[in-house]
Image (tube, coloured by chain):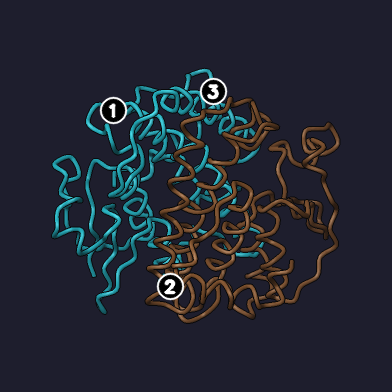
Chain colours: A brown, B cyan
Amino acid sequence: MKLYDYGPAPSPRRVRVFLAEKGIAVPTVQVDLRAGEQFGAAFRAINPDCTVPVLELDNGRRITDAIGICRYFEVVQPEPRLMGTSAEEQAEVESWQRWAERDGFYAVMEAFRNWARGLKDHAIPGPDAYPQIPALAERGRARVERFFARLDARLAESEFLAGPRYSIADITALVSIGFAAWIKLAPPETLGHLARWSAAVNARPSAAA
Amino acid sequence: MKLYDYGPAPSPRRVRVFLAEKGIAVPTVQVDLRAGEQFGAAFRAINPDCTVPVLELDNGRRITDAIGICRYFEVVQPEPRLMGTSAEEQAEVESWQRWAERDGFYAVMEAFRNWARGLKDHAIPGPDAYPQIPALAERGRARVERFFARLDARLAESEFLAGPRYSIADITALVSIGFAAWIKLAPPETLGHLARWSAAVNARPSAAA
């Protein structure tokens, strides 16, 4: 088994933090996204979508979606649970993970990819050319500010994002905030609940992954 | 238990088809999105995000995300499995569901919400004002055409989207294609694998939900 990865990139980091929380070690292969290695013939043969992470199983099959990879490990090694246990808890985790991804991760990506000089025709990840739309870069930033405010409001009523236990929803939020530094945005210090949560999740050894 | 729903809308339809496949009946409450009922004080008290579907449990708690709701029912009543069984299968279903949502459902939504006359400041679902971006309407259409082509390519090698069994990934794809009619797009008849799959999934009684 191996994980195609790129150290600085936020998408594979979601998987790395997840694996660190489970205490699972998987050998990684670095794909240099900054050098465009994902668009080369060798990597296209591994994932025609030209994205990382990719998990290659021992039977040769590949999972090319970050959350799909996390789901694989959650089933293979359920403890510690990162996707909830009871039906209600699993639904809650799923909902908050999706919220953090949509309003956080994708909002940062929208702002970053429609602004970065090196991504002119890569406003959407993958092999297809999509030109940047400057209005989207601006909208993305506004969305990220709202994401910070809502995250703080949610954390005023809950220890972790999806309830009393750390979950994959926290991982998505944590990685999204790290990603926001790429567009030079950070949660305002006045958001005290977010600050309390941020200190807690970043103190976990998994945050270094 | 009750499901806040709106008959013509694609998001709650995902849940309705899922429930029909499981043979689960849940009483529904219609929220008239066309009349703007989701923005009224009464519904805001139920879901501040102003979206349907919302599942209200007997203990009063609410799940406000379509896939979160499906996850709830998958755990409560596992059979028939719509999210996979083995680790590999669950990862596969998760990955294809997410692909169909991102490249299909969200692409149609991008095209529709940035174009429809009645949605001027509602380019993103929810209570926040986001003005339409005409370039996004155009980009959305291009993405939907690519979605059709890739879906056909995938269905050339697989009976259903995530493998040999019908799953929630098929539901997302099916609902996305229905939603595409709102922007007057339909898969070209030349895509034979897609046509074969489409006939099969639409022949299931759940498609009427």
**Same chain shared by disc 2 and disc 1:** no
Foreground pick, A41 / B150: A41
Q: Is residue A38 left or right of residue A201?
A: right
User: Where the C terminus of chain A falls, by quadrant?
Assistant: bottom right
**What residue is shown with label 1?**
B116
Residue kind at label 2, given as amino acid type: Leu
Q: Is residue B104 left or right of residue B53?
A: right
Quadrant hosting residue B3: bottom left
Where residue B10 sits: x, y (%)?
Answer: 32, 42
**What residue is shown with label 3?**
B191
Foreground pick, A187 / A17: A187
**The numbered mark 2 sits on a residue in which chain?**
A
Residue kind at label 3, given as amino acid type: Leu
Q: CA distance from mark 1 to mark 3?
A: 28 Å
Residue kind at label 1, given as amino acid type: Ala
**The numbered mark 3 sits on a residue in which chain?**
B
Q: Residue at 46% across / 40% down in the picture?
A: B173
Q: Residue at 56% across / 60% down in the picture?
A: B84
